[in-house]
Amino acid sequence: MKPTPPLITPTAFSPPSALTGFRWPRLPWGMLAAIGTVALTFGVMAYLLLARSVSLTAIPADAQLGVEDFFAPRIGSHWLLVPGPHRITGNAPGYKPLDAEITVTEASLQQHTLALTPLPGRLTVSVEPVGEARVSIDGVDAGKAPGVIEEIEAGTREVLVEAPRYMPFVAKLEVRGKRQDETLAVKLTPAWADFKIASQPAGAQVSVDGKLLGPTPLAAELLHGEHRLSVSRAGYKPWSRTLQVEAGRAVSIPDVVLAKADGMLEIVTEPRGAAITVNGRYRGESPLKVAVTPDTDHRITAMLAGYEPQNASGRAASDATSNIALQLAAELAVINLMTEPADAELLVNGQPAGNATQRLSLPTKEHEIVVRRAGYASFRTLVTPRRGVDKHLRISLKTAAEMAAAEAPAAYTPPPSYAPPAPPNQQNASPYPEQGSSEAQRQADLSAAQFAPPEVQQAMAEQRGREPGSAAAAPPPATAGRLRTGLGQDLARFDGGDFSLPGRAPTRLTRPFYLGLREVSNADYRRFIANHSSRGAEGQALDADNQPVVGVSWEAAAVYCNWLSRRDSLPVFYQIRYGRVLGINPDAVGYRLPTEAEWMWAAGVGPEGRPQEFPWGAAFPPAARGANLADGSATQYLSAIIPGFDDGFAGSAPVGSFPPNGKGLFDLAGNVAEWVHDGYAANPAAGLDPLGPPNAAQHVVAGSSWATAVREKLRSGAREAAAAGRPDLGFRLARYAQ
């Protein structure tokens, strides 16, 4: 029998750990603990030395604040924090969480206040009397009313409530936020006013801002603000007005009277192109249509160069057209030509017409006359014959040497201002002719020039010492206070202003203007009409180059102004057709005659802006040699003189021979009286920049002359009417500055 093996019994087992068999080293643990304690103590002491006491105050006061640092000791409401940035957090009921950063400085004690932002609030808006309106908060659309508007940031807010046909409602609202509710009750005010309108006749259509409302009489409503109101009816002129409507304030217009619509005159002439005036006012060239007052007779005149003026009467019904047909009859007049040399050739309007010395019968319109001969500078002129007037042209052709001498520019030397020259020799005086049509009046529309063929131009260039075709010098430009024409005539600039003279209504001159320092001389005028003669009168010689031009009509003076304007490249002031002044261009800055208001301001307003009785001041008579008036030297020629006064001249003196007035203008007293622009009326034109009546048979003559002795006629405001030139009547230049 085999032996029984021993039984194996279970027993508890634990696996060995990693430290099985590890023995801790023998270290000076006590010493290490002491060193750690000392290091921690020094670290805390260093932090305390570097840290600053920082007070953190929260808004609201019950907010909980914290400093998100690893080590931030707190003592009450103070934290010990080292300099530098620190993150602060906080929260409070009804406020948004705070997450902010502060910077701690080196200061010993610091305080920071941290405000938490309230959560948004809600607004409940009610509105009447409308069912719906739009709400804007701080200019941003927020929704409709009535209703609740969510998420309104706390603070002062501007609430705008708008609805059609009502005035906007604006209110300032303090929103508390923190999810609290606010309420706003809105009552809108109507933005319209009641409107009524009636018209004569009734039944006219009413429109507001282009929208048709209906016929009159009409009752409607107009919204607050500015509106353009129009009333119209067929056969009548439209009526319109701008209305300023206030909400709640009724507007009533019961008396709109519609005027009948203009009638139309359709005017045709044979031949075409005639100048048409209606009631004396130039309206254009035929054929044309002209609007006129209905059911009234109108005076129509047709004028065409070379034809007799044709007059007619026309009438048109309201909103209707009447046809006027005019047949013009040809008109002929005589031109007498006398030429040197005698065998010169004549061309009329470019066509050969035989020998230049002859009597021509031409239509009364502008013609080009050319007289030529080999070896001479040709003569060219534009001439308009006048019915009943035999015009005489004496033409002397010039050689190359004569042309060069005539065109050589001469330096402009103003005449002496204060010391008058010795009186002219009266022994050679020529008598003044009858007071009929003067040469200037007959030839006011005449402009002449000599031109040379190429071979003569070359000879002239050699005489002048310059190249052929070289341009003449341009006229000097105007300065701020002075201007000089291309002929060398000086003008001074003035600003005018408000003034009132005895016997004249208050006047205001607002447009700056220029006035000639001196009267236009014979030499100046002969640059325009070479053969003009200021013939003597009362035994006096008036024709010297430096004496003022006289014997010219008002229209002749106006034509001279336009001629000089074109010469200086300026827009013409006068509208002239066929030698007649038909109108003016008041915006033009070309030369013109002074207005009566400008002349009277220059003569009658003293240096201090006060009226003065005479152009030279208050004393009468003026100082010796102070003005050229009717004096003792003219006793044998004039019926009346100023006793005891002697100016040294029995007739006119050279322009600018006597002292100027306080404005630097010569001869406003004496020498020659002067044409001004204005047509004559019993009462002088006044008001704002007056130009006088547009149509007048006579024109105003201002000032006195060498033949004036009566004290009343020597005063600054003296004026009279004239229709023709005189031996003691001239003019000076003027023009607007802008």
Image: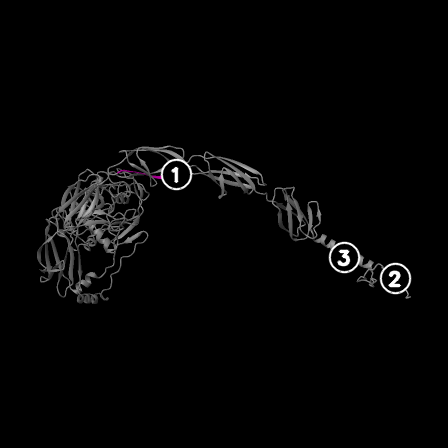
Callout 3: 10 Å neighbours few (<14), some, many (20+)?
A: few
Verify CB contact (< 8 Å) between mark 2 and mark 3.
Answer: no
Q: Nearer the viewer, mark 3 or mark 1?
A: 1
Seen from the viewer's position, the closer of residues 656 and 582 is 582
Q: Which residues are magenta?
A: 225-233
Above or below for 251 versus 394: above
| Residue 89 percent location from the top left of the image | 64, 48
Q: Amino acid at mark 2?
A: Leu
Residue underneath mark 3: 39
Inspect this view and state whether residue 703 appears. no
Seen from the viewer's position, the closer of residues 137 and 499 is 137
Residue underneath mark 1: 225
Residue underneath mark 2: 7
Report whether 428 appears left or right of 82: left
Q: CA distance from mark 3 to mark 1?
A: 85 Å
Q: CA distance from mark 2 to mark 1?
A: 122 Å
N-terminal of the pair, mark 2 or mark 1, is 2
| Residue 471 location, quadrant | bottom left
Seen from the viewer's position, the closer of residues 644 and 340 is 340
| Residue 491 percent location from the top left of the image | 27, 51
Secondary structure state at the residue bearing disc 1: strand
Q: Amino acid at mark 1?
A: Gly
Q: Nearer the viewer, mark 2 or mark 1?
A: 2
N-terminal of the pair, mark 2 or mark 3, is 2
Verify CB contact (< 8 Å) between mark 2 and mark 1.
Answer: no
Callout 2: 10 Å neighbours few (<14), some, many (20+)?
A: few
Secondary structure state at the residue bearing disc 3: helix
Main SS, magenta region, reads: strand
Q: Which mark is residue 95?
A: none
